[in-house]
Image (cartoon, rainbow, N blue to C red):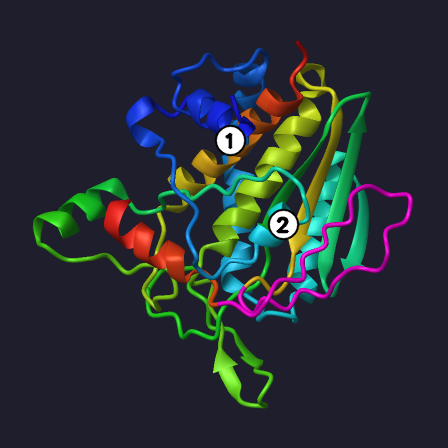
Amino acid sequence: MLGKDRVHEQKPVMGGEDFSAYGRAGVPAAILWIGAQDPKALAAARAAGKALPSLHSSEFAPDRERAVKTGAATLTVAAIELLGRR
Amino acid sequence: MPAALALAAVLAATSPAPPGAAAALAPLDALWPELDALYQDLHRNPELSGQEERTAAKMAARLRAAGYGVTERVGGHGVVGVLRNGKGPTLLVRTDLDALPVLERTGLPYASTATATAPDGRTVAVMHACGHDVHMTGWVAAATLLARARDAWRGTLVFVGQPSEETGRTTRPAPRSTTPPSPAASPARSRPCSARTASTSRSR
């Protein structure tokens, strides 16, 4: 759906995020990390060797349409995959 | 194949999208103007952990409008929407609700100028600097799309709006009643979003 080069499976990390409480309650769980930066801004920053303002930054400014649509589509398709009629 | 791996395969399109997925997503572009208005409203009106009263009310209203049975004030300002659609598994979809004590300096037309009283009594600027406004808007969109695509799935959807992700202080809900599943999020103290900060800045 998103493209093979756009989905990466991540190993669990010991970061701060209480979502693990759902999994520890005994429910199989997956958390999605959605890339939210404007691809052009990201490419320009990379070319300049800089980092874009990220989470918790006062200048964090996601590419809202792309990020929201990616999240919405991913959740929707994931739900249909898991609850779909066979 | 474990569910998480199967999910990754579908999203990456190494496995075919499930039947009905394309039709379910078809209204997304037409919904965008309304979703964008919601996003900007959320971004302009961020609320600190434990103070997500207006945010939670907005989420509850959107779920109700989409046809979900909604319970509010679950574990603080938590929201739980349930949509039953025949026999089948139950799937919980979670968003966080809270924002951070950060002064926004993006210069965006919809930048937050909000302030709030922090737990220590100080007045602080508040900003959705961790993307929870993105999470909420995508979550509302998915709830709406799935409610419109009931032919494509069977089971029960539970959409949870969880307060206080940033502080890890969601109150454990009361013992479960007959309504399914009470999301018992009562995690240890944590440093939320920090891992995502690192991975996001590097690779996205």
In front of the other: A19 or A37: A19
**Residue located at (50% from left, 26% from top):** B7
Please name the amino acid that badge 2 sits on: Arg
Q: Secondary structure beneath disc 1?
A: helix
Asked whether residue B62 is drawn in magenta, I would say no
Q: Position of residue B196 (x, y in %)?
A: 39, 54
In front of the other: B148 or B168: B168
Residue that lies at the very extreme toward the right in this rendered image: B178
Asked whether the viewer can see residue B27, the reply is no
Answer above or below: position of B45 versus A73: below
The quadrant the C terminus of chain B occupies is top left
Q: Position of residue B25 (x, y in %)?
A: 54, 23
Asked whether residue B167 is drawn in magenta, I would say yes
- State the image quarter where residue B184 is shown: bottom right
Q: Main secondary structure of the magenta part?
A: loop
Quick check: B177 left or right of A4? Answer: right
According to the picture, the residue beneath numbered tag 2 turns out to be A24
Answer above or below: position of B100 versus A37: below
Quick check: B6 left or right of A83? Answer: left
Q: Position of residue A15 (x, y in %)?
A: 43, 59
- Chain label for disc 2: A
Q: Which residues are magenta?
A: B166-190
Labels 2 and 1 touching (C-beta < 8 A): no
According to the picture, the residue beneath numbered tag 1 turns out to be B4
**Residue located at (35% from left, 69% from top):** A58
**Which disc is residue B120 wearing?**
none
- State the image quarter where residue A28 is shown: top right
Answer above or below: position of A7 versus B105: above
Residue that lies at the very extreme toward the left in this rendered image: A48
